[in-house]
């Protein structure tokens, strides 16, 4: 197992399962991209230092990453925090390996680096804008904008990588990007609803008081309908089956998670057996979603 694979396994239960379904030519670049975005997320949510220091770090990355990706390592080196205070050991190890990850990123082909760079800069800039804001008094539009910044953009980045590797999908790019935004936002909203109790305990709140849980779940389900459209377009456009399975697995896990949260409330999670059953079905299917 490579270091990249090991870091992926330690920092993401879902993507550690879905990325190996991708074609070999995409697995490494998507893994590197995910881990770079995971570092940005860790700066935003996990670092035990001031909000202003974290905001400044994200702003510096967004301003200078295009010029020199090593700025990510430099920024982390200037921040003063106790790595042992980071609750997730995988995130702490990932930060220690930032230099190695940047080297892996710099070795990617230009067609892979370009979308990763573009969208990482955008998400870091957006995170800096929202960092420290209490969205409990905000609107549903504030929530949607936040979900777009931290996850909708990721969907757009992945779409650009998929099209770069399946050039015959280029005529569908605009439609795929639109649905990928809903896909990413839906996944993020489900995570926020599921983790809402833990977020409040950690001093964060993303959910507007004006919306009850049923309304939030309804919004998430609408977004997931966009995810279904996204996957059907990939499937009908004769995308590589590995790309279809990657997305179908992420969708199936999200749908099962929102069902669990609707039934059991925040904190409800899928069992290992449930995840294994979903993985087995998706990984063996030649057409994970039925066409109309």
Image: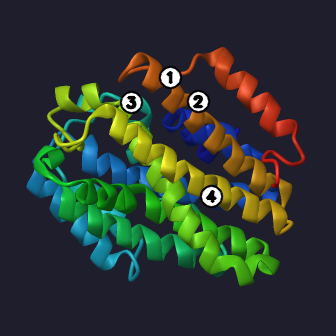
Q: Are marks 1 and 2 in contact (CB under 8 Å)?
A: yes
Query: Which quarter of the image is occupied by the N terminus?
Result: top right
According to the picture, the residue beneath numbered tag 4 turns out to be 30
According to the picture, the residue beneath numbered tag 2 turns out to be 256
The Cα–Cα distance between marks 3 and 2, rounded to whole angstroms, is 12 Å
Q: Residues within 10 Å of mark 3 (few under 14, many from 20)?
A: many
Q: Is residue 85 left or right of residue 27?
A: left
Q: Nearer the viewer, residue 146 or 78?
A: 146
According to the picture, the residue beneath numbered tag 3 turns out to be 194
The way the protein has been coloured in the rendering is rainbow
Is there any visible trace of residue 70 in the rendered image? no
Give me the residue at 38% from left, 83% from top.
67
The Cα–Cα distance between marks 1 and 2, rounded to whole angstroms, is 6 Å
226 over 176 or under it: above or below: above
Q: Are marks 3 and 2 in contact (CB under 8 Å)?
A: no
The Cα–Cα distance between marks 2 and 4, rounded to whole angstroms, is 24 Å
Question: Looking at the picture, how far across and down is residue 146, in whole percent?
Answer: 30, 57
Give the mark nearest the N terminus, 1 or 3.
3
Q: Could you tell me which secondary element the residue under label 4 belongs to? A: helix
Camera-side mark, 4 or 1: 1
According to the picture, the residue beneath numbered tag 1 turns out to be 260
123 over 98 or under it: above or below: below
Q: Are marks 2 and 4 in contact (CB under 8 Å)?
A: no
Q: Could you tell me which secondary element the residue under label 3 belongs to? A: helix
Question: Looking at the picture, how far across and down is residue 148, in whole percent?
Answer: 38, 61
Give the mark nearest the N terminus, 4 or 1.
4
Camera-side mark, 2 or 4: 2
Report which quarter residue 93 is drawn in.
top left
Question: Looking at the picture, how far across and down is residue 55, in whole percent?
Answer: 17, 60
């Amino acid at each position: 197992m490579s270091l990249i694979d090991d870091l992926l396994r330690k920092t993401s239960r879902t993507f550690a399962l879905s990325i190996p379904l991708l074609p070999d030519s995409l697995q490494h670049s998507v893994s590197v991209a995910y881990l770079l975005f995971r570092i940005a997320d860790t700066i935003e949510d996990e670092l035990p230092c001031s909000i202003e220091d974290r905001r400044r770090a994200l702003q510096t990355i967004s301003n200078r990453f295009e010029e020199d990706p090593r700025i990510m390592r430099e920024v982390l080196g200037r921040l003063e925090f106790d790595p042992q205070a980071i609750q997730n050991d995988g995130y702490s190890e990932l930060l220690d390996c930032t230099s190695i990850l940047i080297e892996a990123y710099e070795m990617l082909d230009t067609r892979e680096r370009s979308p990763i760079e573009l969208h990482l800069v955008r998400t870091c800039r957006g995170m800096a804008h929202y960092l420290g804001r209490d969205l409990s008094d905000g609107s549903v539009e504030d929530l949607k904008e936040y979900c777009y910044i931290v996850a909708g953009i990721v969907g757009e980045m992945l779409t650009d990588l998929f099209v770069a590797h399946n050039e015959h999908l280029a005529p569908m790019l605009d439609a795929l990007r639109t649905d990928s935004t809903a896909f990413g936002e839906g996944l993020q909203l489900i995570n926020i609803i599921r983790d809402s109790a833990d977020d409040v305990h950690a001093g964060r709140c993303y959910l507007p008081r004006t919306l009850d849980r049923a309304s939030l779940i309804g919004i998430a389900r609408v977004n997931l309908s966009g995810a279904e459209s996204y996957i059907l377009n990939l499937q009908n456009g004769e995308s590589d089956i590995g790309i279809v399975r990657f997305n179908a697995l992420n969708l199936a896990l999200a749908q099962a998670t929102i069902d669990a949260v609707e039934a059991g409330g925040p904190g409800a999670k899928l069992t290992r057996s449930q995840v294994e059953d979903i993985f087995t079905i998706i990984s063996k299917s030649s057409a994970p979603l039925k066409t109309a």
